[in-house]
Image (cartoon, rainbow, N blue to C red):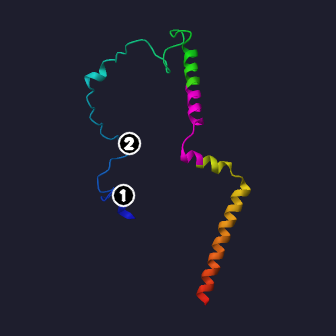
Amino acid sequence: MGNLCSSERDPFSQPGRPLGTTPAAPASASVPASARTPRKVGGPPRTLGGASPAAAPSGTNNDARARAAAAAEERFRKSQQGGGKLKAQLNERRARTDSEVLREASAVERGHRDLDRSVDALAHS
């Protein structure tokens, strides 16, 4: 794994410095003029979620609630309408009981076993 995770040059190849001395100070970068001037923020403070309750008319919250309720009722009405062939098949599957499903699966399995027996009988004759 040697040089796979480390640098190729030897860390001790460069001359060191005596104990108690500090490394050379890096050159300072110049600060852009735009960073020196304070930023100006304009306008009144705003809260998340729209207008503050004091500025909003008294009926706004009730209107929003009424619109949400009306939209929910509309979605419910649309979901109750007939959905065509696929919706009918889904409703038919939902209406079946567990015993009907098990009975049908058992009949399919019996059919497979009968088919296997007949194939074995033909192979031996």
Residue 119 is one of the magenta-drawn residues: no
* Residue in the foreground of this view, choosing between 121 and 45: 121
Few, some or many C-alpha atoms within 10 Å of disc 2 (few <14, some 14-19, many ≥20)? few
Residue occupying the point 38% across, 58% down: 5
Residue occupying the point 66% across, 74% down: 113
Residue occupying the point 35% across, 62% down: 3
Q: Quadrant of the C terminus?
A: bottom right
Which residue type carries mark 1? Answer: Ser
* Residue in the foreground of this view, choosing between 76 and 35: 76
* Rendered view: 40 above or below 3: above
User: Whole-percent x and y of residue 73?
Assistant: 59, 27
Q: Nearer the viewer, mark 1 or mark 2?
A: 1
User: Whole-percent x and y of residue 108?
Assistant: 65, 66
Q: Which residue is mark 1?
A: 6
Magenta span: helix, strand or loop, mainly? helix
Q: Which residue is mark 2?
A: 20
Few, some or many C-alpha atoms within 10 Å of disc 1 (few <14, some 14-19, many ≥20)? few
Q: Helix or strand or loop: what does disc 2 sit on?
A: loop
Q: Quadrant of the N terminus?
A: bottom left
Q: Residue furthest right?
A: 99
Residue occupying the point 54% across, 47% down: 85
Which residue type carries mark 2? Answer: Gly
* Rendered view: 32 above or below 81: above
User: Whole-percent x and y of residue 119?
Assistant: 60, 81
